[in-house]
Image (spheres, rainbow, N blue to C red):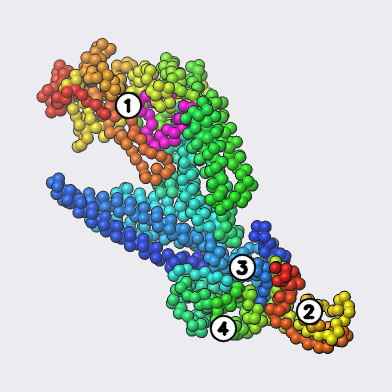
């Protein structure tokens, strides 16, 4: 289990993480989403033991993580730009990892070397971005980590490999009870993979939910009126996140389920009404807009 | 529950990192090995071929030439390995420690399940081993080749082992500490170079100021002193001050291991992770440039007074140097004002300290003890001074304070001292001019020479006061008017400071017996150690010990000076008649020449650490008047056939030579 208690990380005057708390249970796949500079990568680096927080603590299975080789041996971090030496190959990098990671599995290593379509004796530095990520994944999964931290892992992967990766991760989680935390802007992929989503903005956790309940909590509703009610606030009493009007047709994003808002909408005598769940991307945009981070505020 | 790694686990982790580094350094190691092997082969071939060619051309034995060639090979090849290793050590070290300076490498190493301290120490161990083991291997090969070819190992070649080990330890440890404190590799390299150059130069300025402003202070005590290169790890390659460099290395590694544990990894690619070394370097750089311009302006007498020129020059140099150093290290002007407080402190401290010593607030320069307060005194005339193997002039001068207890002689010493003070230029400008020479001069193996004088007093309170003056400090360039004969001619002086009395027999190269300027007997002691030389010197010493008079045997130095400057006395010094008026019993003259070297060099790295070499002007020749009372000496001279029964030069002696009379050690 991963526990973050009131974690704060500052880079000189910039506060990257501000008093953040989070608890991640074993065997879950958590997606970190958020605006650029929201602190996702910083959070992953703290989780991986690369950075030391200014205050607060990170506990992995009850152990402090920073500079604790035993705890770090259970974790693996693939950064957004993994580093490889000029002469590194998958095979000679494995030489280092098999001595450092206590759970290193030769069997898994051999398996993943065949699963991912890359040459384990080729220089990694000469490979494409996607292949370098695959190389990093082979090494990561061979260490059999209990906690895997991935930063923008889908970047550069072709659809087949993305699919393969998702499948491998899901299998691994199921088989080994592995916990995965993925930071990504690719919400579509996260939607398939994650069972929880954390939404971050400017170092704060805006929201942290199960993906299913998240989907259930938001509705995109289209309401058409033959005669628009003559009220200053038509949707008063409904938890509306944003409204977009086109003549007599309103597109409304509402926090809540049909049971919460349908009676009130029906009371407005709409000519047409339809409600459907939001995609993760739509939820993201809505929530970020509510936090003051939308296109209008940027432009 | 907190799991901790056992020592065995840590060793395993450290070994994994070491092995991994070895893989990543394979390319550089291969280049080193190829270069070392090729150069060794080339040097061996050239030494043998050239040695034999020379032997053939001069007609000497090929076997002997071969032996010498192998010794040359040993020294040259070892030297080549020495320099090659220094270069590659720098390359390995920069590469190995760069793991802290790139954000991507930080992600890799920071997330590995190994403690930061173990990681750093294993990286350091990699740097030591990659530097030393290949060097030791190739030096071993060179020694094995030499031994197989029948030649013993030379001291020069063996000492390279030690120098490499100490130098490598110190340089890698120092760079390790610097790299922990810096955020980028380029800053680490700049910082390392800066500390290796700026510190010793700054130390030289401090030494120069001490020597230049405290006239009479023997700054030779700084020679080879660790403080001159305390922060310059390259100086460890000289192989001196070994204990200091070992402590330095341990302290650097321990400090690094402590700092690396809490180092903010996010500082990678920023200027610094810890700013203290940066502040120290900026102050050192400002000090150095400020001192350079300050001393320059002071010695050029701008504004008509040395000190004013110094203050102007110091501020003019230190402030821009500080700003430029800041720009280089911080990559901009950020935090310039905030970090300028040390510069202000530096300017105030230096200007105030220089004012104190410029105005001689402590009265050091013109101090001559009162006769009533002196228990005993000593004096050394640099021209008439044989060094008996001791390099520590400071100790020799301090010991001289026991030489004379007689009030009259003490008075002579004090009189001479007062005359020196009177003829010394204590002006501010002159002091600043002295700084330049004082910065470099003590690299001479021995300081005293022409017109250089040392005084030592033991005061009633037990305190020993010493002063050493050399000719460049005088107003007239030389202390010409000082008559030192009253002291030099004394028995005590001859006993303590002459080659005739102090030198080993092996150190005396030549003995010549003369009665006039055109003929004499010449005994060479240079090869096959002439027993007759020993007998003459032994007999002289015996007579000297038995002689109860004071000044019956004299040194005759003035004639040499006149000879050197080609004046009217030319040619008279080696004629016994010259001395007959003063010494009616004079029978003959004995002149000895010693093997004191004119030049003594150390290591090329001294250029960085201490300055340039100057010629040692210690006199090599002494001349003695032998009176009739020196019966042992005269009878030995007769026994070996140098003198005949009439106490004249024996023309039939094997040692007889018609010399034209000029015999000089110069």
Image spot of residue B235 (x, y percent): 43, 46
- Circles 4 and 3 on the same chain: yes
Residue placed at 23% from the left, 51% from the top? B69
**The C terminus of chain B appears in which quarter of the rendering?**
top left
Horizontally, residue B522 falls left or right of residue B378, namely left
Instruction: Check whether the beta carbons of the residues at disc 2 and disc 4 lie within 8 A of each other.
Output: no
Chain under callout 2: A
Residue placed at 51% from the left, 25% from the top? B304
Q: How far, Cα to Cα, is label 3 from label 2?
A: 43 Å
Image spot of residue B509 (x, y percent): 24, 32
Q: Secondary structure at mark 4?
A: helix
Residue placed at 13% from the left, 28% from the top? B654
Q: Secondary structure at mark 3?
A: helix
Q: How far, Cα to Cα, is label 1 from label 4?
A: 95 Å
Q: How far, Cα to Cα, is label 4 from label 3?
A: 27 Å
Q: How far, Cα to Cα, is label 2 from label 4?
A: 37 Å
Query: Which of labels 3 and 2 is toward the front?
Result: 2
* Magenta segment: B429-455
Residue placed at 53% from the left, 39% from the top? B317
Label 2: which residue?
A: A245
């Amino acid at each position: 289990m991963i526990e973050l208690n009131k974690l704060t990380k500052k880079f000189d005057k910039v506060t990257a993480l501000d008093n953040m708390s989070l608890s991640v249970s074993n065997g879950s796949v958590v997606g970190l989403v958020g605006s650029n500079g929201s602190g996702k990568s910083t959070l992953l680096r703290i989780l991986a033991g690369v950075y030391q927080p200014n205050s607060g603590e990170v506990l992995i299975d009850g152990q402090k993580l920073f500079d604790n080789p035993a705890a770090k041996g259970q974790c693996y971090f693939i950064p957004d730009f993994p580093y490889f030496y000029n002469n590194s190959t998958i095979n000679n990098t494995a030489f280092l990892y098999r001595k450092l990671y206590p759970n290193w599995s030769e069997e898994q290593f051999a398996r993943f070397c065949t699963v991912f379509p890359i040459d384990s004796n080729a220089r990694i530095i000469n490979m494409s971005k996607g292949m370098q990520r695959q190389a990093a994944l082979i090494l990561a999964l061979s260490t059999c980590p209990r906690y895997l931290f991935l930063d923008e892992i889908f970047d550069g992967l072709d659809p087949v490999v993305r699919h393969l990766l998702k499948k491998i991760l899901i299998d691994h989680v199921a088989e080994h009870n592995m916990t995965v935390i993925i930071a990504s802007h690719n919400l579509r992929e996260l939607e398939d993979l994650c069972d929880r989503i954390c939404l971050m903005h400017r170092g704060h956790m805006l929201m942290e939910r199960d993906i299913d309940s998240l989907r259930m909590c938001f509705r995109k509703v289209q309401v058409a009126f033959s005669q628009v009610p003559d009220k200053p606030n038509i949707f008063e009493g409904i938890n509306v996140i944003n409204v977009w009007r086109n003549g007599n047709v309103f597109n409304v994003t509402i926090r809540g389920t049909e049971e919460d808002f349908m009676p009130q909408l029906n009371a407005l005598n709409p000519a047409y009404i339809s409600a459907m769940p939001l995609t993760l991307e739509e939820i993201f945009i809505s929530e970020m807009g509510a936090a003051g981070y939308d296109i209008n505020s940027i432009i | 529950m907190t799991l901790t790694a056992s020592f065995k686990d840590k060793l395993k982790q450290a070994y994994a990192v070491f092995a991994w580094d070895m893989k990543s350094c394979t390319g550089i190691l291969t280049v080193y090995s190829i270069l070392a092997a090729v150069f060794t082969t080339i040097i061996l071939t050239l030494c043998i071929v050239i040695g034999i060619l020379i032997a053939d051309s001069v007609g000497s034995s090929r076997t002997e030439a071969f032996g010498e060639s192998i010794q040359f090979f040993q020294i040259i090849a070892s030297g080549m390995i020495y320099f090659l290793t220094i270069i590659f050590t720098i390359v390995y070290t920069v590469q190995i420690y760069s793991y802290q300076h790139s954000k991507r490498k930080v992600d890799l190493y920071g997330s590995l399940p190994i403690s930061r301290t173990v990681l750093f120490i294993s990286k350091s161990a990699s740097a030591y081993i990659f530097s030393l083991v290949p060097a030791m291997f190739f030096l071993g090969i060179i020694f094995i080749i030499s031994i197989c070819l029948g030649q013993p190992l030379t001291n020069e070649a063996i000492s390279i082992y030690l120098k490499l080990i100490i130098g490598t330890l110190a340089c890698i440890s120092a760079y390790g500490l610097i790299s922990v404190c810096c955020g980028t590799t380029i800053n680490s390299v700049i910082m390392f170079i800066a500390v290796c150059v700026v510190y010793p130069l700054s130390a030289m300025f401090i030494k120069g100021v001490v020597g230049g402003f405290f006239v009479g202070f023997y700054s030779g005590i700084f020679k080879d002193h660790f403080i001159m290169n305390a922060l310059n790890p390259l100086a460890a390659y000289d192989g001196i001050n070994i204990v200091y460099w070992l402590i330095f290395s341990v302290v650097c590694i321990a400090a690094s291991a402590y700092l690396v544990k809490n180092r903010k990894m996010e500082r990678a690619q920023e200027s610094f992770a810890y700013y203290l070394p940066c502040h120290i370097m900026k102050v050192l750089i400002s000090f150095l440039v400020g001192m350079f311009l300050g001393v320059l302006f002071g010695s050029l007498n701008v504004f008509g007074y040395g000190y004013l020129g110094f203050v102007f020059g110091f501020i003019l140099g230190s402030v821009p140097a500080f700003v430029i150093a800041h720009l280089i290290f911080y990559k901009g002007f950020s935090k310039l004002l905030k970090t300028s407080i040390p510069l202000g402190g530096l300017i105030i401290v230096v200007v105030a300290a220089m004012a104190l010593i410029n105005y001689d607030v402590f009265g050091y320069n013109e101090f001559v003890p009162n006769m009533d307060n002196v228990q005993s005194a000593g004096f050394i005339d640099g021209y008439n001074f044989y060094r008996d193997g001791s390099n520590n002039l400071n100790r020799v001068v301090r010991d001289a304070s026991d030489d004379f207890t007689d009030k009259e002689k003490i008075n002579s010493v004090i009189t001479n001292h007062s005359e020196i003070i009177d003829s010394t230029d204590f002006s501010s400008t002159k002091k600043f001019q002295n700084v330049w020479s004082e910065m470099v001069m003590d690299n001479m193996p021995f300081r005293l020479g022409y017109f250089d004088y040392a005084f030592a007093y033991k005061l009633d309170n037990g305190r020993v006061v010493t002063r050493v003056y050399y000719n460049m400090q005088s107003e007239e360039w030389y202390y010409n008017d000082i008559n030192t004969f009253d002291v030099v001619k004394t028995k005590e002086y001859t006993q303590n400071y002459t080659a005739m009395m102090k030198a080993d027999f092996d150190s005396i190269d030549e003995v010549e017996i003369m009665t006039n300027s055109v003929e004499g007997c010449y005994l060479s002691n240079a090869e096959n150690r002439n027993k007759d030389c020993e007998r003459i010197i032994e007999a002289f010493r015996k007579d000297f010990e038995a002689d109860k008079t004071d000044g019956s045997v004299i040194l005759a130095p003035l004639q040499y000076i006149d000879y050197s400057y080609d004046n009217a006395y030319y040619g008279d010094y080696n004629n016994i008649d010259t001395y007959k008026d003063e010494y009616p019993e004079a029978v003959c003259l004995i002149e000895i020449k010693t093997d004191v070297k004119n030049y003594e060099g150390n290591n090329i790295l001294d250029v960085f650490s201490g300055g340039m070499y100057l010629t040692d002007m210690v006199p090599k020749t002494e001349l003695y008047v032998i009176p009739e009372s020196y019966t042992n000496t005269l009878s030995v001279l007769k026994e070996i056939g140098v003198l005949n029964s009439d106490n004249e030069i024996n023309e039939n002696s094997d040692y007889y030579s018609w010399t034209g009379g000029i015999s000089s050690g110069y």
